[in-house]
Image: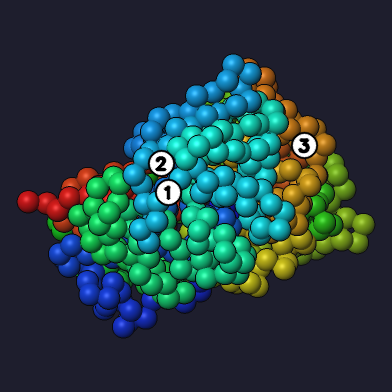
Amino acid sequence: MTARSIRGMAAATLAGALALTAAACSNPGSGGSGHGAGDSVVVGIAYEPETLSPLLGYGKDGNSKIFDGLLAFDGDMKLKPALAVALPEVSADGLTYTYKLRKGVTFSDGKPFSAKDVVFTYRTILDKKTNNPSRTELDALKDVKAAGDDTVVFTLKYPYAPFAERTVLAIAPEHVAGKQDVNSGPFTTRPVGTGPYVLTGWSKGEKISFKANPHYWGGAPKVKKFTMAIIKDDDVRATRLRSGDLDGAILPPNLAKGFRNDADKKTYEATTYDYRTVTLPTHNKVTGDTAIRRALDIAVDREAMVDNILEGAGKPAHGPVPTGSEWFTKGTERRHDLAAAEKILDDAGWKRGSDGIRAKDGVRAAFPLWYLSGDKLRQDHALAYASDAKKAGIDIRTQAGTWEVIEPRMKHDAVLAGGGSPGDPDFDQYQLLKSSLGGDGFNNMAWYDNPVVDKALDDGRRTDDKAARKAAYDTVQRELVKNPGYTFLTHIDHVYVVGDAWDGLSTQVEPHDHGLAAGPWWNVEKWTPKK
């Protein structure tokens, strides 16, 4: 799981543990409340960020509401200009990217935006004193310089094919963020940006409230008040939506289907790269055993999970890359084969005891599996995984907890995790699998250590030759068949239910980090009221 994706869970992560109180739900937007509140919209999401500072990772994938990047993604996930007036000019050797900036843009405090803010943002993120868990995403960047007020030049250490996609990263104002502690200053919770919305309040564990920026360079939004209610529990979110306290919410498929006959609401399904996986920590005597890992990989019934847990809103996952992606390596699909799983264990010396659970050299084939409290999808995946494992003679004990409880245990205990990022295979796989990132927050949660994978990950990000990159990521996916440090279970379609009061709603191909930057409200600044 990547730092981005999980910080959005814990944050994301990337995540407050309190359900929205009744008072907050009845008046979550300080003036607009839930369904039908004129120019106000309130949506229920499951996770909240740890920070609202781009310097610490907020808004790095776009759609941050408060900020803009140099570029942005449109509805088809194609890059388009934002704070830049056009896509970058790229040198023939792929090492220089030049951006011309939009003139006349101001931050929400009225101060002008210029090239120095771009330079400040990127240089601060690259500073090792800055606590940004996603710094490795900018590993290719050697330097960034301003050429006057309206031109920025990036110089790379090596050709990095998806660099332009990294420049959707939100830009922070130097005149505010540069005058305080980057890791703990007030900017982390009271930001100033150039985006379509201005933060009006953040009650941690309850809600994040915004008002429209009337001076936004892209035009003042019609939705004047926008509130994200932080509701961790899936059932509570569905109840609040049904009662009218919310205008929309992300819901598990089995709860979303309860709104199918509601004429006032519409259901939106977003295709995603979002996967659910079980970490198999290298430092655990059971989960670090290759035979256990390989057996679990084929003992699990992924199709049954898609049918019974996701109600068809998703597909089996055979690795971080969805099977429909051009980067997926055909032939790495895992078949459900319990008999083959048992043979792997038998051959490796994992023998069944009188209770049906296997053991080897005095070590019992048993380990805990943690999942996030209140997350029904994770709970259901964990229970199904444990059930499948038991048939193979592996005893998995499922346990719920908050990220504060789970994170210190990740080196030795398995976790029902989530991740996934569209755009480029480097975006997710590097932070998920690179051995040097084991123990770095939510990066490489399994402490996976495979020298062949490490080299392929480096090869894949250090060239812009597509054939060479495909060969590198093919190597990664084939190695995960030989020694899977994770059991990938499903890729999940995100399901949203939203009141039918506005035009302009759509979905993008979404990352794991859903509800905050993604969802039908990814472009809420472009919504218009139905006539």
Of pointers 2 and 3, the one earlier in the residue sequence? 2
Amino acid residing under circle 2: Leu
Amino acid residing under circle 3: Asp
Element at badge 3? helix
The residue singled out by tag 3 in the image is: 454
Decide which of 198, 226 is in the foreground and name it.
198
* Residue drawn at the location 31% of the way across and 83% of the way down: 23
Q: Which mark is residue 36?
A: none
Q: Is residue 265 visible?
A: no
* Residue drawn at the location 79% of the way across and 47% of the way down: 436
Quadrant assignment, res 185: bottom right
Left or right, 163 with respect to 263, comes to: right
The residue singled out by tag 1 in the image is: 113
* Residue 392 position within the rendered picture, expressed as x and y whole percent measured from the top left: 70, 51
Decide which of 504, 172 is in the foreground and name it.
172
Left or right, 476 with respect to 92, comes to: right
Quadrant assignment, res 258: bottom left
| C-alpha gap between disc 1 and disc 2 | 9 Å
Of pointers 3 and 1, the one earlier in the residue sequence? 1
Are the residues at dot 1 and dot 2 in contact (C-beta closer than 8 Å)?
yes
Tell us which disc is closer to us: 2 or 3: 2
Q: Which mark is residue 83?
A: 2
Task: Bin the neighbour count of mark 2 within 10 Å (Cα to Cα): few under 14, some 14-19, many 20 and up.
Answer: many
Decide which of 324, 424 is in the foreground and name it.
424
Amino acid residing under circle 1: Phe
